[in-house]
Image (cartoon, helix red, strand yellow):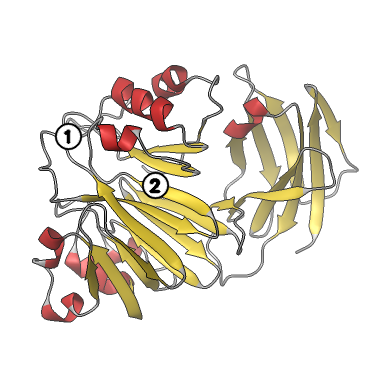
Amino acid sequence: MKTIFLFGLMAATLVVSSAQQPGFTALQLLTNREVRLQLASTSRYRIDFSTNLVEWGPLLSAERTVSAHTNAGAIYQTNGFYALREYADTNFITGNHFATDTGEVIVRPVNHASFVMQWNEVMIYNDVVGANSLYSGFKKGQVVLVSHTHQDHFNATTINFVRATNGVIIAPQAVFSQLSTTLRASTIVLTNGASTNVFGINVEAVPAYNGNHARGTGNGYVVTIGGKRFYMAGDTGAIAETRALQNIDVAFLCMNVPFTMTVSEAASVARDFRPRVLYPYHYRNQDNSYANLNELKRLVGTDLGIEVRMGRWY
């Protein structure tokens, strides 16, 4: 991958390398200290980040049609440099990149509670529903996680479309009972507290319940990849088991009314288990309005070092 442009932010002063196109066109320090990146690119690209121009880490990748990004993590960084690189390898999806001990994990939201993750050659699908066209651009999945039976989290037809020939479905018993004989043969049933290891990935089922979801019928999941821990909440309330989670690097936390958590409940839970990166997801309410994400950021605050990251869910 060839570096084609570099932008830096040092103590709120803009530092720009020699201009070369395609590349960044603007870098804006927002009032909340996040950084807004504007760019023009004629190719698929990725952006890496450094605080010292020596050690670089992955930030994100995108198709050429996406021309702006906000780095919410910049509020915790005094110095920041951004390198734009070509990302021509179409074996990999685009999205947010997270470094692990054994390769990068790429996270790509799809819709509501559905998203995909890629780690090396392994594709992981979470709570896939909706038209097959939503997933037609992705490689088939070796791991398919299903949290519970509600229709905005589980669709057997969609699972059948995204699953690779050798793909494994991980689900609670209630989901297993609704699968075809063929899909059951590829399914590992996990109860709350149980775990399994597939394709080098550890998956632990954790409780997910509230007044609308009976305890024990659904799962949240903690997925460990190369030492990084990813938490998928499924549908849950502000329960003690979520508050007690430990060492979560990336969390996907549900937030809608009246089915899961309010904004204030989600913020309270996040402040208790303190993920390093928090994605609010599943935030479309019953009346089709959306939860107030700015209020979530305000309530989570910045004193605990939690980066609230906004994905393209809707």
Does label 2 or label 1 sit earlier along the sequence? 2
Choose between 123 and 171: the one closer to the eye: 171
Residue denoted by label 1: 259
Q: Would you say 271 lies left or right of 212 here?
A: right
- Circle 1 residues within 10 Å: few <14, some 14–19, many ≥20: some
Q: Would you say 298 lies left or right of 31 here?
A: left
Q: Residue at x 8, y 66 (%)?
A: 177
Q: Dividing the picture into quarters, in which one does residue 243 lie?
A: top left
Percent of width and height locating residue 61 = 60, 53
What is the three-letter code of the residue carrying label 2? Tyr
Q: Secondary structure at mark 2?
A: strand
Q: Is residue 205 above or below residue 14?
A: below
Residue denoted by label 2: 231
Q: Would you say 87 lies left or right of 183 here?
A: right
Q: CA distance from mark 2 to mark 1?
A: 19 Å
Percent of width and height locating residue 300 = 44, 22
Choose between 195 and 161: the one closer to the eye: 195
Image quarter hosting the C terminus:
top left
Percent of width and height locating residue 44 = 63, 59
Q: Residue at x 19, y 69 (%)?
A: 157
Percent of width and height locating residue 92 = 56, 67
Q: Dividing the picture into quarters, in which one does residue 236 lie?
A: top left
